[in-house]
Amino acid sequence: MNGREATTSAGIRPTRFALSKRSPFRLHAVITRVVFAALLLAALLTTPGQLAAAASADAVSQPNFKLRWVSKATNSGAWTLEATGADGKALAGLQAANWVEAEWQKLLAVHAEQGDPLGSIGMPSMLGTYRVRSGAIQFEPQFPLEPGVRYVATFYPARFPGAGGGQPITTTFVLPRRSTISTTVVTQIYPTSTMLPENLLKFYIHFSAPMNRGHIYDHIHLLNSAGNDVAMPFLEIDEELWNPDMTRLTLFIDPGRIKRGVTPLEEIGPALEQGKQFTLTIAREWTDASGAPLKENFTKRFDVGPPDRVPIDPSAWKIQPPAAGVRAPLVITFAKPLDHALAQRVIHVANSDGQPVAGECSLDDQERRWRFTPASPWHRGSHAVLVESTIEDLAGNNIGKPFDVDLFEKVEPRLEHATIRISFEVP
């Protein structure tokens, strides 16, 4: 301006001014007049209809987004983050966009703080599954949340398609630390027999509640009759053999300590020795999924008999048929103890039409007897027991196929994977 007059596009002639060192307060007055003129100009150029449209647009572009964590009752560590507040049409469009995970993370990101705020800077977002469901944007972490860890979730409304803006919304969540009260126990170790073959293949360890994964061999010991640890008795693998519920562990004896003609057996000897007594111990320091140690130690003492290298022979089994019209169990007595888990999974019952009979099975008498109770009363007529040839005894022998074959023995032709059928009548 420099002392000159300037005319606005609306024809408003602002006051002519000049600054003087002797007028220190005139600068404030000048600024006030300029701001007032700008506001007046904006008001004159905006119509009432435009003002109403702007207000309406602001209401649409600022949905009431909210974040919340929702627990899955089936697993204490499984939580889902939900972002709610968007209308159905917008959610449908978002679902149809088929975003990749990196695009979702720009809209909704979750970070696990590392304890040191500076150490958390630049940390990548947690991995997981994004989806639109039940009127919300959902994020399910790839791994369960850990108690005591601070999780920070941030939603960016400005990146929501069609939202038009808005400040980021942040929420923090900390899963309470688990109780350290010890309640979990070892409920059973299979085989249950107190006399086991020298070439026993595996144990099954059952717990009353889910257990922690990792470092399991620190808590399992095989002791000889003198109370000393047997050297390297187990097949220690990183992929621990748990059932989906984490309540049953399959523990293999090292096959190198079983099979004849291999180096470990010849140099170290068998893990179990015929004629001697051993003890399998489970230490209470082993923690369950809640982080609490076992309630007590568990021990299984057993004697070792001769090795078993005889394949399973179903023709030697004794079948006790049930009567028609009742739900009495079908009972099969084996010639020797069988693998507990496999016997419950690979033995089935079929009716005369070849259709499976629904029901439940169990084993008792130290895994020598199998019972099948049908879901409904038996029908009179022909039935069959179907047995997969992969069933095992305690030494890992199958139907027609021994587990341990001496490298210098003649190997006879063996039955490949098949299903054996044993017929019986329901009178």
Image (cartoon, rainbow, N blue to C red):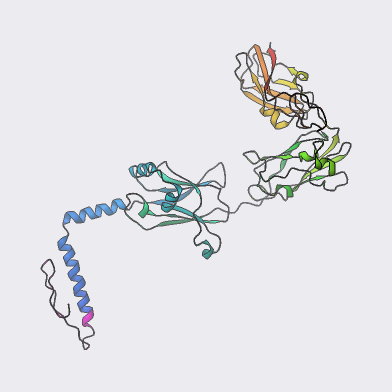
- Image-quadrant location for residue 368: top right
State the residue at coordinates (56%, 56%): 149
The number of discs equals 0
Q: Where is residue 361 drawn, in percent x and y? A: 67, 26
Residue 108, above or below 352: below
Where is residue 134 drawn, in percent x and y?
42, 41
Of the pair 153 and 95, the residue shown nearer to us: 95
Q: Is residue 17 magenta?
A: yes
Question: Would residue 183 be found to the left or right of residue 366 on screen?
Answer: left
- Prevailing secondary structure class for the magenta stretch in the rendered image: loop
Q: Is residue 273 magenta?
A: no
Question: Is residue 329 shown left or right of residue 132?
Answer: right
Question: Can residue 271 be spotted in the picture?
Answer: no
Query: Image height check: is 169 above or below 405?
Result: below
Q: Image height check: is 38 above or below 183?
A: below
The foreground one among 324 and 391 is 391
Give x and y (percent) for residue 416.
69, 25
Which picture quadrant has residue 46? bottom left
Magenta-highlighted residues: 3-27
Q: Is residue 283 left or right of residue 94?
A: right
